[in-house]
Image (spheres, helix red, strand yellow):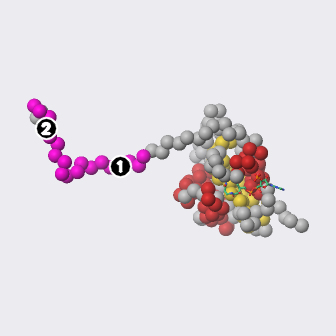
Amino acid sequence: MVSLPAYRKITAEKDLPEDLAGDGLVDFLHEHLDRFTDDRASIARALEYAFSTEAGKGGFVLLAEQGGETVGAAVMNRTGMSGYIPENYLVYVAADAGRAPLGTGAELVRRALEESEGDVALHVEPDNAARRLYARLGFEEKYVEMRWKRPQEVRWKRPQEVRWKRPPGGK
Ligand SMILES: CC(C)(COP(=O)(O)OP(=O)(O)OC[C@H]1O[C@@H](n2cnc3c(N)ncnc32)[C@H](O)[C@@H]1OP(=O)(O)O)[C@@H](O)C(=O)NCCC(=O)NCCS
Protein backbone atom coordinates (compact mmCIF):
# COMPACT_ATOMS: atom_id res chain seq x y z
CA MET A 1 0.00 0.00 0.00
CA VAL A 2 1.29 3.46 -0.91
CA SER A 3 1.44 5.70 2.13
CA LEU A 4 0.35 9.30 1.72
CA PRO A 5 2.16 12.24 3.26
CA ALA A 6 1.03 13.73 6.53
CA TYR A 7 0.59 17.50 6.50
CA ARG A 8 1.71 19.69 9.35
CA LYS A 9 1.27 23.42 9.91
CA ILE A 10 4.21 25.13 11.61
CA THR A 11 3.96 28.65 13.05
CA ALA A 12 7.20 28.86 15.02
CA GLU A 13 10.75 28.07 13.98
CA LYS A 14 11.32 25.99 17.11
CA ASP A 15 8.65 23.54 15.91
CA LEU A 16 10.49 22.64 12.71
CA PRO A 17 11.68 19.03 12.54
CA GLU A 18 15.37 18.48 13.18
CA ASP A 19 16.30 18.02 9.49
CA LEU A 20 14.80 21.42 8.65
CA ALA A 21 16.25 23.37 11.57
CA GLY A 22 18.93 25.98 10.97
CA ASP A 23 19.21 26.39 7.19
CA GLY A 24 17.48 23.04 6.51
CA LEU A 25 14.19 24.48 5.28
CA VAL A 26 15.95 27.19 3.25
CA ASP A 27 18.01 24.44 1.61
CA PHE A 28 14.94 22.27 0.94
CA LEU A 29 13.06 25.11 -0.71
CA HIS A 30 16.09 26.39 -2.58
CA GLU A 31 16.64 22.95 -4.09
CA HIS A 32 13.05 21.90 -4.81
CA LEU A 33 11.81 25.22 -6.13
CA ASP A 34 13.95 23.99 -8.95
CA ARG A 35 14.33 26.44 -11.84
CA PHE A 36 11.85 28.80 -10.16
CA THR A 37 14.00 29.08 -7.09
CA ASP A 38 14.87 32.28 -5.29
CA ASP A 39 18.12 33.29 -3.67
CA ARG A 40 18.62 31.85 -0.19
CA ALA A 41 18.43 35.25 1.52
CA SER A 42 14.93 35.88 0.09
CA ILE A 43 13.74 32.42 1.15
CA ALA A 44 15.15 33.01 4.64
CA ARG A 45 13.33 36.37 4.85
CA ALA A 46 10.00 34.81 3.84
CA LEU A 47 10.43 32.17 6.56
CA GLU A 48 11.43 34.74 9.16
CA TYR A 49 8.34 36.78 8.25
CA ALA A 50 6.07 33.69 8.44
CA PHE A 51 7.35 32.90 11.94
CA SER A 52 7.26 36.52 13.13
CA THR A 53 5.03 37.37 16.09
CA GLU A 54 5.10 41.11 15.29
CA ALA A 55 1.73 42.76 14.76
CA GLY A 56 0.71 42.73 11.08
CA LYS A 57 3.22 40.02 10.21
CA GLY A 58 3.21 36.24 10.53
CA GLY A 59 1.92 33.33 8.53
CA PHE A 60 2.88 29.70 8.52
CA VAL A 61 4.78 26.90 6.86
CA LEU A 62 3.02 23.77 5.78
CA LEU A 63 5.05 20.59 5.54
CA ALA A 64 4.28 17.37 3.72
CA GLU A 65 6.04 14.53 5.53
CA GLN A 66 6.41 10.92 4.56
CA GLY A 67 8.40 8.19 6.28
CA GLY A 68 9.94 10.75 8.63
CA GLU A 69 11.17 12.92 5.75
CA THR A 70 10.00 16.20 4.33
CA VAL A 71 8.70 15.74 0.78
CA GLY A 72 7.02 19.12 0.28
CA ALA A 73 6.62 22.56 1.79
CA ALA A 74 4.57 25.71 1.35
CA VAL A 75 5.20 29.14 2.86
CA MET A 76 2.37 31.58 3.52
CA ASN A 77 2.93 35.17 4.62
CA ARG A 78 0.15 37.31 6.10
CA THR A 79 0.18 40.73 4.48
CA GLY A 80 -1.46 42.61 7.35
CA MET A 81 -3.89 44.09 4.82
CA SER A 82 -7.24 43.15 3.36
CA GLY A 83 -9.54 44.06 0.52
CA TYR A 84 -7.57 45.66 -2.26
CA ILE A 85 -4.47 43.79 -1.05
CA PRO A 86 -5.30 40.15 -0.13
CA GLU A 87 -4.75 39.04 3.45
CA ASN A 88 -2.21 36.39 2.50
CA TYR A 89 0.54 35.75 0.05
CA LEU A 90 1.51 32.21 -0.88
CA VAL A 91 5.21 32.80 -1.32
CA TYR A 92 6.57 29.32 -2.10
CA VAL A 93 5.31 25.81 -2.84
CA ALA A 94 7.72 23.02 -3.59
CA ALA A 95 7.55 19.26 -3.75
CA ASP A 96 10.48 16.88 -3.90
CA ALA A 97 9.93 15.48 -7.39
CA GLY A 98 11.80 12.26 -6.57
CA ARG A 99 9.93 11.37 -3.42
CA ALA A 100 6.62 13.25 -3.15
CA PRO A 101 3.69 11.18 -4.39
CA LEU A 102 1.45 12.58 -7.10
CA GLY A 103 -0.92 15.14 -5.66
CA THR A 104 1.41 16.47 -2.96
CA GLY A 105 1.74 19.94 -4.48
CA ALA A 106 -2.00 20.31 -5.00
CA GLU A 107 -2.71 19.08 -1.47
CA LEU A 108 -0.18 21.53 -0.01
CA VAL A 109 -1.86 24.44 -1.77
CA ARG A 110 -5.38 23.22 -0.91
CA ARG A 111 -4.49 22.91 2.77
CA ALA A 112 -2.58 26.20 2.80
CA LEU A 113 -5.79 27.89 1.59
CA GLU A 114 -7.80 26.07 4.23
CA GLU A 115 -5.38 27.11 6.99
CA SER A 116 -5.39 30.81 6.14
CA GLU A 117 -8.03 33.45 6.75
CA GLY A 118 -9.07 35.74 3.92
CA ASP A 119 -7.92 35.87 0.32
CA VAL A 120 -4.65 34.62 -1.08
CA ALA A 121 -2.42 36.04 -3.80
CA LEU A 122 0.62 34.49 -5.41
CA HIS A 123 2.78 35.10 -8.40
CA VAL A 124 3.82 32.47 -10.86
CA GLU A 125 6.02 32.65 -13.91
CA PRO A 126 4.09 32.48 -17.18
CA ASP A 127 5.87 29.26 -18.21
CA ASN A 128 5.37 27.41 -14.92
CA ALA A 129 3.12 24.34 -15.21
CA ALA A 130 1.97 25.09 -11.64
CA ARG A 131 -0.43 27.64 -13.20
CA ARG A 132 -2.74 24.75 -14.13
CA LEU A 133 -2.66 23.45 -10.58
CA TYR A 134 -3.48 26.90 -9.17
CA ALA A 135 -6.27 27.42 -11.70
CA ARG A 136 -7.80 24.08 -10.81
CA LEU A 137 -7.88 25.13 -7.17
CA GLY A 138 -9.77 28.31 -8.04
CA PHE A 139 -7.04 30.91 -8.57
CA GLU A 140 -7.86 33.41 -11.28
CA GLU A 141 -5.38 35.31 -13.39
CA LYS A 142 -6.82 38.64 -12.37
CA TYR A 143 -3.89 40.96 -12.92
CA VAL A 144 -0.55 40.95 -14.62
CA GLU A 145 2.02 41.66 -11.96
CA MET A 146 4.34 44.52 -12.82
CA ARG A 147 7.24 45.36 -10.60
CA TRP A 148 9.44 48.37 -10.44
CA LYS A 149 12.88 47.66 -9.08
CA ARG A 150 14.50 50.53 -7.27
CA PRO A 151 17.83 51.16 -8.93
CA GLN A 152 20.86 50.47 -6.80
CA GLU A 153 21.82 53.65 -5.04
CA VAL A 154 25.01 54.99 -6.54
CA ARG A 155 27.14 57.05 -4.22
CA TRP A 156 27.95 59.90 -6.47
CA LYS A 157 31.43 61.28 -6.14
CA ARG A 158 32.63 64.36 -7.88
CA PRO A 159 35.56 63.24 -9.98
CA GLN A 160 38.75 64.98 -8.96
CA GLU A 161 39.45 66.22 -12.46
CA VAL A 162 36.17 68.07 -12.87
CA ARG A 163 36.54 71.76 -12.20
CA TRP A 164 33.33 73.68 -11.97
CA LYS A 165 33.40 76.97 -13.72
CA ARG A 166 31.90 79.90 -11.94
CA PRO A 167 28.89 81.27 -13.83
CA PRO A 168 29.64 84.60 -15.47
CA GLY A 169 29.34 87.30 -12.86
CA GLY A 170 29.11 84.71 -10.11
CA LYS A 171 31.21 84.76 -6.98
C1 LIG B 1 4.50 23.01 -8.52
C2 LIG B 1 4.72 21.80 -7.63
C3 LIG B 1 4.72 22.23 -6.16
C4 LIG B 1 3.56 20.82 -7.86
O1 LIG B 1 3.74 19.73 -7.00
P1 LIG B 1 3.38 18.25 -7.46
O2 LIG B 1 3.38 17.41 -6.25
O3 LIG B 1 4.24 17.87 -8.58
O4 LIG B 1 1.90 18.51 -7.99
P2 LIG B 1 0.73 17.48 -8.08
O5 LIG B 1 1.23 16.06 -8.08
O6 LIG B 1 -0.28 17.85 -7.07
O7 LIG B 1 0.16 17.84 -9.50
C5 LIG B 1 0.92 17.58 -10.66
C6 LIG B 1 -0.02 17.11 -11.74
O8 LIG B 1 -0.49 15.81 -11.45
C7 LIG B 1 -1.92 15.79 -11.44
N1 LIG B 1 -2.41 14.89 -10.41
C8 LIG B 1 -2.43 15.13 -9.08
N2 LIG B 1 -2.95 14.06 -8.43
C9 LIG B 1 -3.24 13.15 -9.39
C10 LIG B 1 -3.77 11.83 -9.37
N3 LIG B 1 -4.14 11.24 -8.23
N4 LIG B 1 -3.90 11.17 -10.53
C11 LIG B 1 -3.55 11.75 -11.70
N5 LIG B 1 -3.03 12.99 -11.79
C12 LIG B 1 -2.89 13.68 -10.66
C13 LIG B 1 -2.30 17.19 -11.14
O9 LIG B 1 -3.61 17.46 -11.60
C14 LIG B 1 -1.25 17.96 -11.88
O10 LIG B 1 -1.56 18.04 -13.24
P3 LIG B 1 -1.25 19.35 -14.06
O11 LIG B 1 0.19 19.24 -14.46
O12 LIG B 1 -2.18 19.31 -15.19
O13 LIG B 1 -1.46 20.51 -13.13
C15 LIG B 1 6.04 21.04 -7.98
O14 LIG B 1 6.01 20.66 -9.33
C16 LIG B 1 7.28 21.86 -7.73
O15 LIG B 1 7.84 21.84 -6.63
N6 LIG B 1 7.74 22.60 -8.77
C17 LIG B 1 8.93 23.47 -8.66
C18 LIG B 1 8.63 24.69 -7.83
C19 LIG B 1 7.48 25.50 -8.34
O16 LIG B 1 7.31 25.71 -9.53
N7 LIG B 1 6.65 25.99 -7.40
C20 LIG B 1 5.51 26.84 -7.72
C21 LIG B 1 5.88 28.27 -7.90
S1 LIG B 1 6.42 29.03 -6.41
Q: Is residue 163 magenta?
A: yes
The main secondary structure of the magenta stretch is: loop
Q: Quadrant of residue 2?
A: bottom right
Q: How far from the left and from the top, in percent, is residue 64?
A: 75, 59
Q: Taking 3 as reference, is 83 above or below it?
A: above
Q: Residue at x 41, y 49 (%)?
A: 152
Name of the residue lying farthest toward the top: 169
Tell me which amino acid carries mark 2. Answer: Arg
- Mark linked to residue 166: 2
Residue 8 appearing in the image? no
First in sequence, mark 1 or 2: give its number.
1
Give SS at disc 2: loop
Crowding at dot 2, Cα within 10 Å, few <14 / some 14-19 / many 20+, comes out as few
Q: Quadrant of residue 142?
A: top right
Q: Is residue 126 left or right of residue 146?
A: right
Q: Look at mark 1 in the image and give the residue it sits on.
A: 154
Where ligand 1 lies, by image quadrant?
bottom right
Magenta span of residues: 151-169
